[in-house]
Image (cartoon, helix red, strand yellow):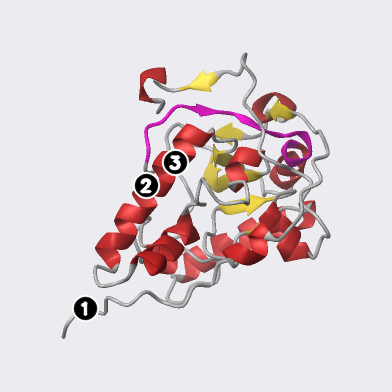
Amino acid sequence: MSENTSAPDTHAEDQDELDAVPIEECGELLVDFLEVCPALLLSPRHPVFEFPRVHLVRESVAKMLCDAASRLPDGLRLQIVEGYRPMAVQREHFKHALQEARKRFPAAGEATLLREAGRYSAPPDAVTPPPHLTGGAVDVSIVRGDGSELDFISPFEMMDLRHAAMNARGLSEEAEKNRALLREILEPTGLTNYVDEWWHWSYGDNGWALRVGAEAAIYDKIEVPSDAHWVGDMNQLPL
């Protein structure tokens, strides 16, 4: 049987709808979420990239994450894989997503490939600021006291994007239970889940505005402070 090379119907927010959302920047600052909430953890590594990271998000998002962390059962901690992301890194993320889309759908046209790549990495040159550049988006997981991560993916692999959606079919009972736990602790805080990625949650950005029916986003893209503390090899930071 030949492989199906046609891209599936997208479940992500439509880019035109995102671009139509006005932004009324509220002026909230980026803060160090580890200082705001010592209960949070920064993942020791990114599952795909080796770019240096900063532990920064908007102040309201940091407080929401702290609230979520307090809802976890004893022995578990909320881990942040990535919060704020600079534009240079975003461009590399999108480039990688486009390369992966070409591998998965070699017969697809360029418009389809760009749309498919955009499901998993926001296009850096779109009208809508990529969520991580606003400081309103975070990628998260939950870990045990020994640092081992709960199972969110079995029986699939981490980068099997066909099953990355929060409500993907075919997950093990354990993975479904842990994704449900993630929703239980994050949804009450005001953070919203991006439908195609169980790990990606945001507040204040264009995607959040669409999900909750807000008249405008409240976070535009924001520059990283010059005194921000970076984790990782700065030689790996794209120019």
Q: Which residues are magenta?
A: 49-62
Looking at the image, residue 9 sits to the left or right of residue 215; the answer is left
Contact check, label 1 and label 3, Cβ < 8 Å: no
- Decide: is 149 above or below 84: below
Residue 51 within the magenta-colored segment of the rendering: yes
Crowd class of label 2 (few under 14; some 14 to 19; many from 20; radius 10 Å): some
Disc 2 + disc 3, Cβ < 8 Å: yes
Whole-angstrom CA distance, mark 1 to mark 3, is: 30 Å
Alpha carbon of mark 2 to alpha carbon of mark 3: how far? 6 Å
In the image shown, does 12 or 31 lie closer to the viewer? 12
Disc 3 marks a residue whose amino acid type is Arg
Residue 136 as seen in the image, left or right of residue 43: right
Residue beneath the point at 58% across and 33% down: 41
Dot 1 amino acid type? Glu
What residue does disc 1 label? 3
Residue 202 among magenta residues: no
Which label belongs to residue 77?
none
Which is nearer the eye, 128 or 62? 128
Q: Amino acid at mark 2?
A: Lys
Q: Which mark is residue 91?
A: 3
State the SS at label 1: loop
Dividing the image into 4 quarters, which one contains the N terminus?
bottom left
Circle 1 packing at 10 Å, graded few (<14), some (14-19), many (20+), is: few
Q: Which one is in front, 154 or 59? A: 59
